[in-house]
Image (tube, rainbow, N blue to C red):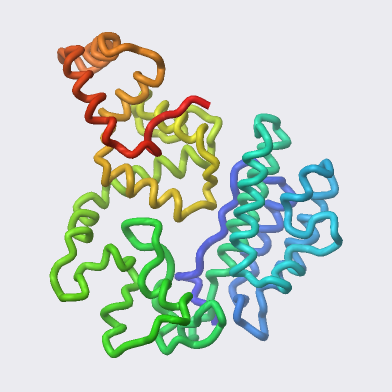
């Protein structure tokens, strides 16, 4: 049996090719008994039955330069064939890299480019979900498929506070780590090593306390980043309710190659924003400065907006403080 409550759901990106989108819907309707490790119901067989024909139909309509970004396209080998050759663990990073290469090489402004990107994102989400889906009654297994001696029903995935893998997930994927008597406590299925509630010496972990206090802000920033990333070319997709803050996320994402499938990177970016104390007020100043306004103009704009006086000196002080924020969070002209 497969634990459907814990199985990740497949996400179809807006703008995905209709043929592929329909195949993914049918796939999800039927995937309950399937998993990557099942012999009776191997999930790669369902991919071969439903997804391969849809991808072949989609690929047949594309110019030749697009095909190099779809694993196996134009070679007569479907996604299922590539997965059988290299496995799910290698297929996930392969798809991510092909998508990133497309983003770097193309301008992504045409309707065809946008549909192609959305289709690749949807296929990535599908393969990632298949890779994560495990039978309900199974021991924890590593990347070599060998049992690691722990309960396989325990949650695996990202740390609650960042994009690192939980200690349990990291243990499962690293055969060099040896199991000890205290693994039930040490191998958390909620937090990574850096964010576990207690340090190895038993003392409270300051990083855990800080992350727990800011969890609401982390979730908020992650939602904004994910929404803007999913609709990169759409202003105000971050839906913060503030035009300047939305514009900050809009221009920030235009300078990135991140995609919704890059979940670890997006989670780490949200963590960095929170830990760097990049408040909405600071985002507004960064956005106005990026727009070419000088300190006096920024002060005037924010004063009229917030109905409270701001001086040029105050903005100057704020910009100096913003210089200490990691450069990766600053807006850059393309």
Quadrant containing the N terminus in the rendered view: bottom right
Horizontal relation, residue 321 to residue 226: left or right: left
Number of marks: 0
| Farthest-out residue, left | 203
Of residues 44 and 259, the one drawn nearer to the viewer in this rendering: 259
6 shown above or below 292: below
228 shown above or below 183: above
- Residue at the image point whose x is 80% and y is 42% from the top: 65
- Residue at the image point whose x is 85% and y is 48% from the top: 60
256 shown above or below 202: above
Query: Horizontal and vertical percent for residue 254?
Result: 52, 32
Horizontal relation, residue 274 to residue 87: left or right: left
57 shown above or below 239: below
- Residue at the image point whose x is 71% and y is 46% from the top: 17
Horizontal relation, residue 310 to residue 121: left or right: left
Query: Horizontal and vertical percent for residue 208?
Result: 22, 61
Horizontal relation, residue 326 to residue 199: left or right: right
Of residues 298 and 151, the one drawn nearer to the viewer in this rendering: 298
Q: Quadrant of residue 244?
A: top left
Query: Horizontal and vertical percent for residue 24?
Result: 66, 58
Q: Quadrant of residue 210?
A: bottom left
- Residue at the image point whose x is 65% and y is 34% from the top: 108
């Amino acid at each position: 049996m497969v634990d459907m409550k814990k199985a990740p759901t497949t996400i179809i990106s807006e703008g995905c090719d209709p043929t592929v989108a329909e195949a993914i819907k049918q796939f999800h309707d039927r995937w309950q008994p399937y998993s990557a490790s099942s012999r009776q119901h191997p999930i790669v067989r369902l991919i071969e039955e439903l997804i391969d024909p849809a991808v072949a139909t989609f690929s047949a309509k594309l110019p030749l330069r697009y095909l190099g970004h779809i694993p196996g396209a134009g070679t007569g080998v479907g996604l299922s064939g590539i997965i059988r050759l290299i496995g799910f663990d290698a297929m996930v990073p392969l798809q991510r890299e092909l998508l990133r290469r497309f983003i770097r090489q193309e301008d992504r402004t045409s309707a065809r480019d946008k549909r192609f990107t959305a289709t690749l994102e949807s296929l990535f989400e599908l393969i990632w979900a298949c890779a994560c889906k495990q039978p309900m009654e199974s021991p924890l297994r590593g990347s070599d498929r060998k049992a690691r001696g722990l309960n396989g029903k325990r949650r695996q995935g990202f740390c609650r506070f960042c994009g690192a893998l939980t200690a349990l997930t990291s243990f499962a994927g690293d055969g060099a780590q040896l199991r000890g008597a205290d693994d039930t406590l040490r191998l958390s299925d909620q937090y990574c090593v850096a964010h576990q509630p207690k340090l190895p010496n038993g003392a409270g972990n300051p990083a855990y306390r800080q992350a727990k206090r800011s969890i609401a802000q982390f979730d908020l920033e992650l939602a904004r980043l994910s929404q803007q990333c999913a609709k990169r070319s759409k202003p105000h997709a971050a839906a913060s309710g503030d035009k300047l803050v939305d514009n900050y996320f809009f221009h920030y994402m235009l300078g990135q190659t991140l995609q919704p499938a890059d979940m670890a990177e997006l989670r780490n970016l949200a963590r960095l924003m929170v830990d760097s104390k990049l408040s909405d007020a600071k985002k507004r100043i960064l956005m106005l400065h990026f727009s070419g306004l000088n300190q006096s103009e920024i002060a005037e704009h924010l004063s009229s907006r917030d109905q409270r006086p701001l001086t040029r000196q105050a903005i100057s002080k704020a910009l100096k403080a913003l210089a200490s924020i990691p450069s990766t969070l600053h807006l850059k002209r393309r």
